[in-house]
Amino acid sequence: MTFLELAQKVLEEIKKPLTANEIWEFGVKKDYDKQLNSKGKTPWATLGAQIYTNERDNLDTIFVVIGKRPKRFYLKNQTNLSDKKNTEELEQNTEEIIVKQQTKYLEKDLHPFLSYFAYYHLNCYTKTINHSKSTKKEFGEWVHPDIVGCYFPIEEWSSEVLSLSSAVGNTSLKIFSFELKKELNLSKLRESFFQAVSNSSWANESYLVAADISNNEDFLKELQRLSSSFEIGVIKIDIEEPLSSEILMPATTRENLDWETINKLTINKDFKEFLKRIKIDLTSNEIRKEKYDKIYEPEDLIKHLKLLL
């Protein structure tokens, strides 16, 4: 059984819209998970990612989306004229909750959501940068990114390949930089974007990240133009359904790091420790996951945010 077949089987039996997490939980109760041809450590994340991708990108998909916050999935052959009404009711009932969420949570509360996304979608271990730990102020306000990350080939390459790559000075690691905002809209776009450029252009890949991104047409055109011009990617964090967070605009991968700027960033203790950690893990060919930001499961992320509201 594939992940999509599991989702289809669950929805056929339940006969009502379910979130990706609900589909997985029911599948486990029915022991369908034991029929999966998968040995991954996080099959629930794989299930969610495959449903979202299939519904979004496949014209022949069997899935449809009901509602937005959270997204629930249904089967096309089970839809009827009442679906539109159901969707409108779902959106209306959650509008008040959405407004409350947007006003109460802080940017720092989004960090675990980004760490989760980076780990599962970019194969990246992240480290939150505390700006108060910088030892100098003369470089101005826009110096440090909110979160940095690193992709290691350690978990994918054999020991022989790792040894050879180290010997020739090509470890193929990739450094990421993330600038995180609660929201992005036309009035705040230029300030937010150029803060991301200032804080992130030294890395192999740089991203501007937000939970609430405007759908205004003029805004999206300008965001796309800036993203293409400055090679900064854009990630949308979904606080209701972490599995549906996505890269809206890809970042351009730079082959070379800006070492002068990296050296300047070592005025921050967290960033300096991040660099030391990368060196230790590369040398030992073992990633100490506990030294990076903790990766929470989607249900824990949602519970944590609800406690703040």
Image (tube, grey):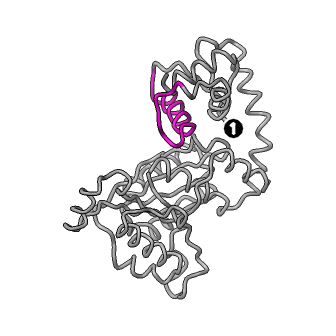
Vertical order, 247 against 43 (above or below) = below
**How many discs mark residues in the rendered view?**
1
Residue 34: x and y in percent read 55, 27
Residue 2: x and y in percent read 48, 25
Q: Which residue is mark 1?
A: 69
Look at 19% across and 66% down and name the residue there: 168
- Say whether residue 192 is visible: no
Pick the residue in front: 132 or 188.
132
Residue 141: x and y in percent read 55, 78
Pick the residue in front: 125 or 167.
167
Magenta-drawn stretch contains 52: yes
Vertical order, 290 against 302 (above or below) = below
Magenta residues, start to end: 35-59
Residue 110: x and y in percent read 63, 57
- Say whether residue 206 is visible: yes
Vertical order, 2 against 82 (above or below) = below
Pick the residue in front: 159 or 227.
159
Along the horizontal axis of the image, is 116 left or right of 232?
A: right
* Occupied quadrant, residue 63: top right
Magenta-drawn stretch contains 162: no
Q: Main secondary structure of the magenta part?
A: helix
Look at 55% across and 40% down and name the residue there: 45
Amino acid residing under circle 1:
Arg
* Occupied quadrant, residue 7: top right
Which structural element holds mark 1?
Answer: loop
